Amino acid sequence: MSMAAEGAASAAAGVAGKPAGPDPWLPRLGRIVSRRRDSRDAWTLEIREQIPQSASFRPGQFNMLTAFGIGEVPISLSGDPAAMDRLIHTIRPVGPVSTALAQMRPGAAIGLRGPFGSGWPLRQAVGGDVLVVAGGLGLAPLRPVLYALLAGRERYGRITLLYGSRSPDDVLFHREIVSWSRRQRIEVHVTVDHAASGWDGHVGVVTTLVPRAQCEPQRTVALVCGPEVMMRLTVAALHAHGIPHEAIYLSMERNMKCALGLCGRCQLQSVLVCRDGPVFRYDRVRGLFAHKEL
Amino acid sequence: MEGLEGIIREHPFFAGLDERFIALVSGCAKNVRFEAKQYLIRHDEPANEFYLVRHGRVALEIAAPGHGALTFQTLGAGDIVGVSWLISPYRSQYDAQALELTRAIAIDGGCLRTKCESDHDLGYEMMKRVVAILVQRLHATRLQILDVYGR
């Protein structure tokens, strides 16, 4: 069974009255433990559940977070999957719910359902090189992957992170990126779209970093997350670099609402993003990218 | 000259170029180095030279009133700096500043343009290579203008 199928099956089991865990429709209560600014406009919340769950999550999965009285939104888990006593979510305020969530202070009550969805294919990456390409807030769903890769560093070949951001102030997890680069035996390249003088790093779109990746294309698994335009151009650059479409995975986080594959809001042709994704192998969703109507 | 020819032959911009053309290009080339903060190119000055970067990093900048210089791209080993030498009116459209010690091959744009005019096969090769770079940069600029990370 694929990871996506596993995720869908466990969610469906809960809905069908054979709960594999708590009722997937019912938000569990949590409390904000800490709130940290991780870029110019992104905030990371550490949450402890009132009744802690015993299961961990798979990198790439998301929770539905509730700001009580306002609404519920899907937010990727951005913390270490090995740290089971807390849930970490990184949020950029764009609408009323995410704004309310991002403003929550320690002690505030928060609702959560999940984790939902498929994860990044870490098993497929064992023994080969791993190329992680993130754009903007897309680094948040990929951070758990980096934690997992680093925890099992000896199982993988070369690990490379290519990260593109809007400006130096928008670089997410800046300190951690520096730490990964210096101490963790992974190759890190960061670029920004534009910068004032004083920034001595790379400037240019993230696709320009692809040729710098020191990986062996035929034995590389590429994991990509960011805005869809960025992902589309990144896939083209990865393919031009020699990485086959079957080895490229994307996270598409479109329009998810129920998270259980029932409401149909995130349906893209035959795909339900919340149930079958959000992580997809590129060749399985290739046709969905070009349709502006979807 | 043999050294220069070898470097030019190996540079990605000239990959696969006919040996006869390599010799013609090499006749317009010289080794140069720039210290950090030194300018390779100044905006609106005659585009007399372009550069094949061998080592180091170069920032392409546009001065914005009230904001100083804004860097819109950085280039490094394997890249070329300057395309205006081939495009009328042959004046630079931006500043290019070395961010660190940068070694490059400078190619006299006027010299190579004259050779392109007299040998259109060479001219076509140069045009194809410069157009490919311009298309790459156009795609990159589109992404930057879309400001995809800000949405």
Image: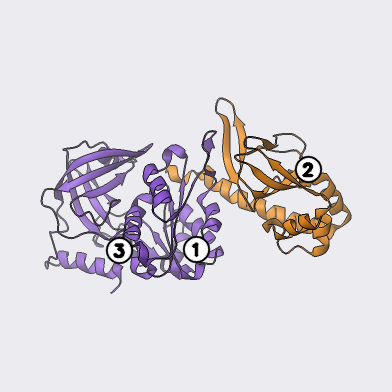
Query: Which of A71/A143 is in front?
Result: A143
Question: Hey, which residue is sitting farthest top in the picture?
Answer: B66
Rendered colour, chain A: purple
Rendered colour, chain B: orange
As drawn, the label of residue A215 is 1
Label 1, secondary structure: give it. loop
Label 2, secondary structure: give it. loop
Q: Which comes before the other along the chain, label 1 or label 3?
A: 3
Q: Which residue is mark 2?
A: B88
Q: How many marks?
A: 3
Q: Position of residue A197 (x, y in %)?
A: 55, 33
In the rendered structure, the answer to whether residue B37 lies left or right of residue B31 reads: left
Q: Are marks 1 and 3 on the same chain?
A: yes
Residue type at numbered disc 3: Ser
Q: Are there few (<14), some (14-19), or many (20+) residues within 10 Å of tag 3?
A: many
Compared to B29, does A5 lie above or below? below
Instruction: Calculate the distance from the C-alpha at mark 2 to the C-alpha at mark 3.
Output: 54 Å
Q: In front of the other: label 1 or label 2? A: 1
Chain identifier of the residue bearing label 1 in the image: A
Chain identifier of the residue bearing label 3 in the image: A
Residue B2 visible in the picture: yes
Instruction: Calculate the distance from the C-alpha at mark 1 to the C-alpha at mark 3.
Output: 25 Å
Q: Position of residue B139 (x, y in %)?
A: 58, 51
Q: Residue at x 12, y 65 (%)?
A: A19
Q: Which residue is mark 3?
A: A118
Residue type at numbered disc 2: Ser
Residue type at numbered disc 1: Cys
Q: Position of residue B33 (x, y in %)?
A: 70, 42
Q: Are marks 1 and 2 on the same chain?
A: no
Residue A97 occupies which quadrant of the picture? top left
